Amino acid sequence: MTMGERIKQLRKEKGMTQTDLAHTLNVTKGTVSTWERNSRTPSFETLDAMCDLFQRRLDYIMGRSDDATPPGQSEVDADALAISQVEEDLTEYALKYARLDQYGREAVEAIIRAEYNRCRCENTLCPVSAYSGRIVISNEMAE
């Protein structure tokens, strides 16, 4: 199936006219018509918007695959992304903390203690085994 045929099929499955699709994607009806006739190809940004709109992968919309399953992130991928974000955040916080003066460090530690105690009292702490890791801070100025 060509990309134009696929766009037309997805548009109709969604119950949209060419005008409806054009309005949604901020293009003209004529532009949608040229896509469906395979005279022109949508921009990457427009294809990306179609992926969101139709809940299909790019290769499906482009007619390169017949796998019509909606795009999704596996639970493993989502967990890895979340861990990666935690690592980045903690590294940023550790580096900022290392630059604080004594008063700033004591203030941060007081907040951490207070929040830890609050979470412990409300029984909302993550289990100790949920995370493990090591943060290494080095002083580039030291010889």
Image (cartoon, rainbow, N blue to C red):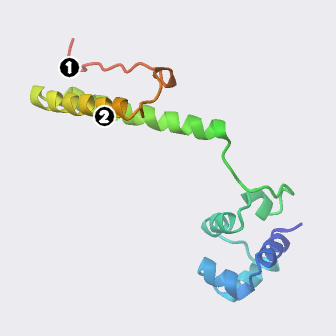
**Badge 2, how many Cα within 10 Å: few under 14, some, many 20+?**
few
Q: Which residue is mark 1?
A: 141
Q: Secondary structure at mark 1?
A: loop
Q: CA distance from mark 2 to mark 1?
A: 38 Å
Q: Earlier in the sequence, mark 2 or mark 1?
A: 2
* Label 1 environment density (alpha carbons within 10 Å; few <14, some 14–19, many ≥20): few
Most foreground residue, 21 or 117? 117
Q: Which residue is mark 2?
A: 118
Residue 4 x %, y %? 81, 73
Vertical position of residue 74 compared to residue 94: above or below? below
Which of discs 2 and 1 lies nearer the camera? The answer is: 2
Q: Amino acid at mark 2?
A: Arg
94 shown above or below 32: above
Question: Could you tell whether 80 is left or right of 131 in the image?
Answer: right
Residue 94 shows in the view = yes
Rendered image: mark on residue 37: none
Pick whichever, 46 or 83, lies toward us. 83
Foreground of the two, 75 or 84: 75
Instruction: From this view, report whether residue 69 is shown above or below residue 127.
Output: below
**Number of dots carrying numbers:** 2
- Quarter of the picture containing the N terminus is bottom right
Label 2: element kind: helix
- Is residue 91 visible in the rendered image? The answer is no
User: Residue at the spot x=44%, y=31% of the render?
Assistant: 87
Q: Using the rendered view, name the quadrant where residue 30 is placed.
A: bottom right
Residue pictured at 68% horizontal, 42% vertical: 74
Instruction: Please state which amino acid type lies under the numbered disc 1.
Output: Met
